[in-house]
Amino acid sequence: MKHRLIPLLLGALLGLPAAAGPGHDHDHDHDHDAAPAARPGDAPQRLPDGTVFLPKPAQRQMALRTLPVAAAALPRSQTLQGLVVMDPDAGGMVQATQGGRLHAPPGGLPGLGQRVRRGQVLAYVEASTASLERSAQAAQVAELRAAAQLAEKRLERLQALVDSVPRRDIEAAQSELLSLRARIAALAQGLGAREALRAPVDGVIASAHAVVGQVLDAREAVFEVVDPRRLRIEALAYEPALAADVGAAFLVAEDGRTQALRFLGAGARLREQALPLSFGGAQGLALGQAVRVLVQTRSSVQGFAVPAQALVKNAANQSIVWVKEAPERFQPRGVTVQALDGDRVAVTQGLSGGERVVVQAASLLNQVR
């Protein structure tokens, strides 16, 4: 009986599940199975290492775009402060050469913005003289008129005796009469003279300081006439060597738009410890307007050209660009930049060739937290 129970007990023991030893728990083994890296979720977020996770749907919603960059020889650039000035060949001042009272021409005094033609009379200035001086001039005119009457009668008598008097006496009398008449005309013109103020060039009235009846001093500016299509910009360069290295120049508007300028030349004398540079081709500006001029040099520097909108600021107010590391991962990269042409900047440090830089929606990506 005992021998028959032993095989039954062994079979029962073999049918039981084997107990796992310490360190071999099945649940523990499952925890240590290899698993894929945890995915940050479906919402855009900034990761602990400073990079940004941005899913593809969010990238499409933000209209995010990237471009690969390549190193190239780019021109150096500087931004100068400039001032709109008059082209000396297409503008001028209208000034009175003598003191007097201002009078309007038949068509009236011109107003601001009115177009005028060269030589057009803009106003008259009636010379002002003291009462004693006017009286002396009037007395002198009366004396000359009396002398002219006597000279005229003497000439008539000599002409009546043309056969008995020398020819030279008649010619002398004629010359004396002509001289007296010319002196009378000159003095009479001085008594009631009016100086005509004329436009020096074709253009528009840029400034006017004229009122009918106004008393002017000599050399006082009354009008300023300019051609708005021919204005110049004077910019100050604190590096005199820049004058010999100007390759291209652009006018930078407040909204960031640019306008190509022509470099006309540089001065030879410092002004406010800077060298004045002259540029032409400016349009839609006003005299005296302060502007910014972006000057590109002929010499170049190695760098990466990226759109200016790709440049943003980090929390430390440093210039950065966003570089695409993976399809949904972007890294901030501190860079050193120089302006190129108003629309682009040259990254001289911080990038490598072939990297993809965010060129659109960089400001939105920079706000992800």
Image (spheres, helix red, strand yellow):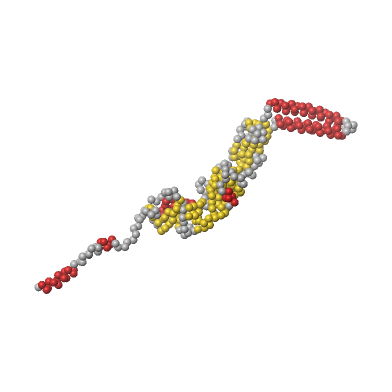
Q: Give percent across and percent down for residue 302.
A: 52, 56
Please indicate whether residue 87 sits to the left or right of residue 10 in the image: right
Residue at (51, 52) in percent of width and height: 338
Q: Give percent across and percent down for residue 58.
A: 40, 54
Q: Give percent across and percent down for residue 147.
A: 79, 28
Whether residue 339 is visible, yes or no, is yes
Residue at (87, 34) in percent of width and height: 167
Q: Which corner quadrant of the image does residue 220 belong to? A: top right
For the N terminus, the image quarter is bottom left
Please indicate whether residue 31 sits to the left or right of residue 157 in the image: left
Q: Give percent across and percent down for residue 351.
A: 46, 56
Nearer to us in this view, 304 or 55: 304
- Farthest right residue? 164
Please indicate whether residue 170 sits to the left or right of residue 81 in the image: right
Residue at (55, 43) in percent of width and height: 290
Nearer to us in this view, 256 or 7: 7
